[in-house]
Amino acid sequence: MQSDPRLWGVYSAASHLFIKRGYAATHVSDIAEAAGIATGSVYNLFSGKKAVLHYVVHSTLLGQPAIADPAELPIPVIPELDIAETMTQKADALFKRLKPPGQVPIPFGDMLEVLFDCIASYQVAFNLINKNPDVLPHLHEQYQQYMKRLYRVTEECLRHGIADGAVRPVCYPELHVRNILEDIAWWAMLLPYEEVSVQLSVEVAREAALDTLRHAYLVRPC
């Protein structure tokens, strides 16, 4: 099945506007203008603005704008619980990579790469969930729970690296975890929407973030 090309335009325009301007301050007409289509066309594709928001979040978690059967247009509001199920699947896969069942955590340097790639891949969804707790309450609560779990796993990986001698000893590892995750989040999730003089590609941002953290923590940085 071929996807309506307008769906990508709406996905791209809406994700940028919802993050930069905010969901409440963004109107369907704004999305249509940014996507280069008529406002009526957006309503031909979606039942309303909330349907667009849910579509953007879910499509990001799926890895691409979802294909819609033309016979099923306009796309209704995807139930939040369905999106939450997809997020659970992605989170479970991430935690299995960071610490395979019954095994020790992966090496600290590998963990940095996995975390950056995950956050960069899903940054649109994470930004929208984090910025819209009132509009996406269930997803926001679930997101907060996964972040708490991520802090614990990251700390375990950091402490394991210190014990192995691959990571330099640090005071209060639990506080360094916050630094590590916030640094990765800035480069992978927040930088694309910052007003900066030079726009960096994901690849360049990745190398900059990993270079900084490797030299900050690894005994022998690559």
Image (cartoon, rainbow, N blue to C red):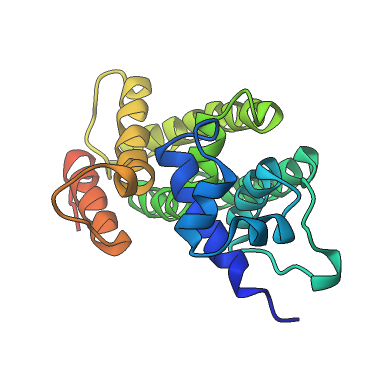
Q: Kindly give the residue lying farthest to the left in the view shown.
A: 197
The answer to which quarter of the image holds residue 176 is top left
Task: Please report the residue visible at 43 percent of the width from the left and 56 percent of the height from the top.
Answer: 117
Front residue of 158 and 83:
83
Query: In the drawing, does residue 172 fall left or right of residue 16?
Result: left
How many labels, in total?
Answer: 0
Q: Can residue 122 be seen in this view?
A: no
Q: Vertical placement of 101 versus 12: above or below?
A: above
Q: Vertical placement of 84 versus 159: above or below?
A: below
Q: Is residue 89 visible?
A: yes
Q: Kindly give the residue lying farthest to the right in the view shown.
A: 71
Q: Where is residue 120 in the image (x, y as percent from the top left)?
A: 42, 53
Front residue of 157 and 73:
73
Q: Vertical placement of 45 versus 24: above or below?
A: below
Q: Position of residue 89 (x, y in %)?
A: 70, 50
Q: Where is residue 48 in the image (x, y as percent from the top left)?
A: 71, 45
The answer to which quarter of the image holds residue 32 is bottom right
Query: In the drawing, does residue 169 fall left or right of residue 146?
Result: left
Task: Please report the residue visible at 64 percent of the width from the left and 50 percent of the height from the top.
Answer: 90
Say which quadrant the N terminus sits in: bottom right
Task: Please report the residue visible at 21 percent of the width from the left and 56 percent of the height from the top.
Answer: 199
Query: In the drawing, does residue 174 fall left or right of residue 15?
Result: left
